[in-house]
Image (spheres, rainbow, N blue to C red):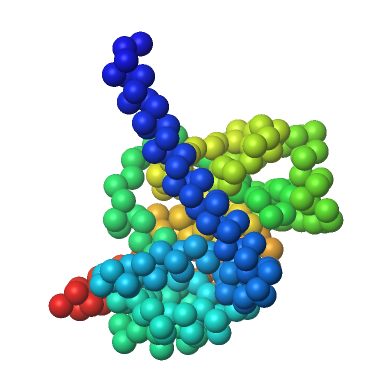
Amino acid sequence: MSFGSELIIKIAVVAAIAPTMALALTIIEIKGSAYMQRRPGPLHVGLRGFIFPIAEVIKFIKDSGKNYMILSSFGDSKSHKENVEFLMKYPPLAFSSRTKKTFDIYSKVTKNSYNGICNAFFISKVIPTLNLNLKDYLIFNFYSTPEPIIDFNIKENNIQLESIKIKEKKNYFNSVLRHLDFLRKHPIKLHSKKIIRTVHDISYKFLHLNFGRKNSYLSYNPLNYLPLYKNCELTISDRVHACVASLSFNKPAMLVGDWGERAELFQRFNIQKVNNVILPTLEQQINQEYIEYVNWIKNVFK
């Protein structure tokens, strides 16, 4: 290896590590002094204070005479009063929400507030996505709960949605017992339908978690998941955004479990269901939401 190539690699490694180290040291310094001084911001604002360094970035942006926007926001934080106070002091140029509750809490922080939907519904409109030469498959995506036992009837190679049966497993000590999940027998097909298991959480450091279930798919590029959702026959998941991705591409989705406030993402739509399966009837509504959202963005910059 030449001296020049070696130098470039070293610079690249340092450039990649330095920002992460700086952020980590900033968190340690801020939270350490916050514990001693009992400062509520670094201790409690946003994910137990771990979003506080973002507040420092916002301060820097505003102090530099520049602006920022908060788009497609979801606010379920118990410390929303502190968040509102901070954003009133350092207001964004624009703010859009993904639920009515979030809008009601944060709309006051700027004159350019918009009660919108989750921007993930727009992925089929703004991201070119390939058509796969792959048919007759389902997507299973389970993270917070063990993968349930699923069955349904087939007629003329079509899933009879009204026949889908979900037998959920008890979620006792899932954070520990999921390490034994690779010992379970996970089917790779249901009747004539193949199963692809998308793994969205790439932070696991254990292969028995990442690939413990057969036909698991994992990518560090989130765009690689989109063709799978675009071409699937049905998505069954305990993750809201796995269902959103499927619906964006006009494919049916079934959200398993009780997701409370996060399920509010769907309240804006006139949803039609069969046996708790959300039918792909949202295309026209999504198109209208997209047009109105783009027009709002344009008006912000006028």
Q: What quarter of the picture does the N terminus occupy?
A: top left
Picture quadrant where residue 273 is located: bottom right
Q: Is residue 53 above or below residue 89?
A: above
> Could one spot residue 207 in this view of the protein?
yes
* Side of 111 relative to 189 (left or right): left
Q: Residue at x 65, y 37 (%)?
A: 205
* Side of 255 relative to 301 (left or right): right
- Front residue of 203/285: it is 203
- Front residue of 128/296: it is 296
Q: Is residue 244 above or below residue 205?
A: below
* Side of 151 relative to 199 (left or right): right
Q: Residue 287: x percent and y percent?
A: 30, 68
Q: Residue 278: x percent and y percent?
A: 53, 64
Q: What quarter of the picture does the C terminus occupy?
A: bottom left
Q: Is residue 136 above or below residue 265?
A: above
Q: Residue at x 55, y 84 (%)?
A: 81
Q: Residue at x 23, y 77 (%)?
A: 300
Q: Residue at x 84, y 56 (%)?
A: 172
Q: How many marks?
A: 0
Q: Residue 85: x percent and y percent?
A: 48, 84
